[in-house]
């Protein structure tokens, strides 16, 4: 009896391309964001038949990517990184250059999403949040955040200079559009730290994004800085946490491919899928982070749009995180903040 070609191949232990399915390692920050990505991107990619996703969580450790690239043993294919890291990693040669012809039309995206080494995947914001069950008068401005007479109690703040210095200047009367111009000067930095010192005895620091909503629910703080997506996740669980959007600082996260990934073509297919209007709209329905593909907005209803950092009402007095400023002055300011916090 003659064996058919397929049977011959199986008997010989040959893996036929039509039967093989490549595995792609996709790394993100986990939490509510990771859950939303699973529904919007990972499940869709798995169903497409292009390959299977192995999801991995990390805390943004660029050093891990650098070690892989330098050792030429890259096991991560697509990684979600924050905006300072896409610039720094690109400059250091840690990432593959992005082939936009395989991703989408640049004109469809927010300008900040288009990078030579990455694709902006969502827009998020660091905002002021409070528990409406415990705080009957809603705070509106960063001046309210600093007003411990009108709103007595602890304030949650991220343990670091980023965002806090900007918020301090806004609380001190600096207009949103002028924040980085002022902060870039010695007098401006001194002014920000002086304003922070006014609040220091009332600050409870947080280091992980899950902590601010926990602080609010427990009543440990009366208001806190927080990532808007974390508050959204708590709201979906039935918690009456609310956001004051005035003076929120928005930023983007990006998809990158570590230099030397053996699955570059498949990685580009995943990034392309995750950048489509349909996929980004589905992501926004699962977590209140704004799409970078502008065509996704037309696919969202008014209720979802109202919760996004990119909605007109929420973004009218927002500040875009200034990557270049923090690249230039961030190290010195973070050291100064660490010394200030330890005093």
Image: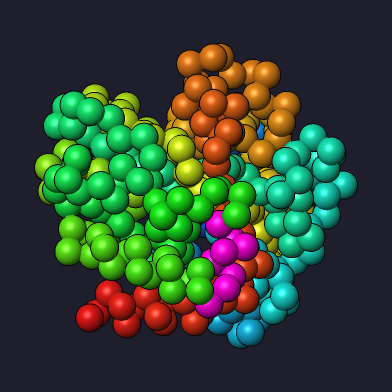
Q: In this view, does 308 lie to the left or right of 119?
A: left
From which residue to which does the magenta span run? Answer: 179-186
Which residue is drawn at the image coordinates 54% and 14% (left, top)? 302
- The quadrant the N terminus occupies is top right
Q: Is residue 139 visible?
A: yes
Which residue is drawn at the image coordinates 67% and 26% (left, top)? 296
Residue 197: image quadrant is: bottom left
User: Could you say which is closer to the camera, residue 131 or residue 107?
Assistant: 131
Which residue is drawn at the image coordinates 32% and 82% (left, top)? 339
Q: Is residue 85 above or below residue 279?
A: below
User: Could you say which is closer to the camera, residue 71 or residue 130?
Assistant: 130
Q: Is residue 185 magenta?
A: yes
Magenta: main secondary structure equals helix
| Position of residue 53 measured from the top left corner of the image (x, y, whole percent) | 55, 48
Q: In this view, does 65 lie above or below 152?
A: below
Which residue is drawn at the image coordinates 69% and 79% (left, top)? 92
| Position of residue 67 measured from the top left corner of the image (x, y, whole percent) | 56, 81
Q: Does the magenta stretch include residue 268?
A: no
| Position of residue 292 measured from the top left corner of the image (x, y, whole percent) | 66, 39
Residue 340: image quadrant is: bottom left
Q: In this view, does 237 lie above or below 71?
A: above
Q: Which colour scheme is used?
A: rainbow
């Amino acid at each position: 009896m003659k064996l058919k070609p397929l049977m011959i191949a199986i008997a010989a232990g040959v893996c036929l391309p039509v039967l093989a399915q490549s595995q792609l390692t996709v790394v993100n920050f986990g939490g509510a964001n990771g859950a939303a990505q699973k529904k919007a991107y990972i499940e869709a990619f798995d169903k497409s038949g292009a390959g299977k996703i192995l999801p991995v969580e990390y805390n943004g450790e660029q050093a891990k990517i650098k070690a892989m690239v330098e050792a030429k043993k890259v096991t991560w294919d697509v990684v979600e990184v924050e905006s300072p890291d896409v610039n720094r990693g690109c400059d250091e040669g840690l990432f593959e250059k992005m082939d936009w012809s395989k991703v989408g039309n640049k004109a469809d995206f927010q300008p900040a999403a288009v990078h030579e080494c990455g694709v902006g995947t969502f827009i998020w914001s660091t905002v002021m949040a409070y528990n409406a069950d415990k705080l009957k008068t809603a705070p509106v401005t960063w001046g309210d955040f600093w007003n411990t007479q009108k709103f007595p109690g602890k304030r949650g703040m991220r343990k670091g200079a980023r965002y806090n210095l900007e918020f301090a200047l806004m609380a001190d009367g600096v207009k949103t559009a002028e924040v980085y111009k002022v902060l870039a000067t010695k007098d401006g930095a001194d002014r920000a730290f002086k304003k922070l010192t006014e609040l220091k005895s009332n600050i409870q620091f947080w280091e992980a994004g899950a902590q601010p909503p926990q602080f609010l629910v427990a009543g440990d703080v009366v208001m806190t800085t927080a990532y808007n997506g974390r508050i959204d996740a708590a709201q979906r669980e039935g918690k009456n946490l609310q956001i004051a959007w005035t003076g929120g600082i928005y930023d983007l996260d990006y998809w990158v491919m570590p230099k030397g990934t053996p699955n570059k073509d498949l990685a580009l297919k995943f990034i392309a899928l995750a950048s489509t209007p349909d996929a980004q709209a589905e992501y926004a329905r699962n977590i209140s982070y704004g799409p970078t593909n502008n065509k996704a907005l037309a696919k969202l209803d008014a209720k979802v749009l109202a919760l996004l950092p990119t909605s007109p009402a929420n973004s009218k007095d927002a500040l875009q995180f200034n990557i270049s400023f923090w690249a230039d002055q961030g190290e010195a300011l973070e050291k100064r903040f660490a010394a200030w916090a330890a005093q």
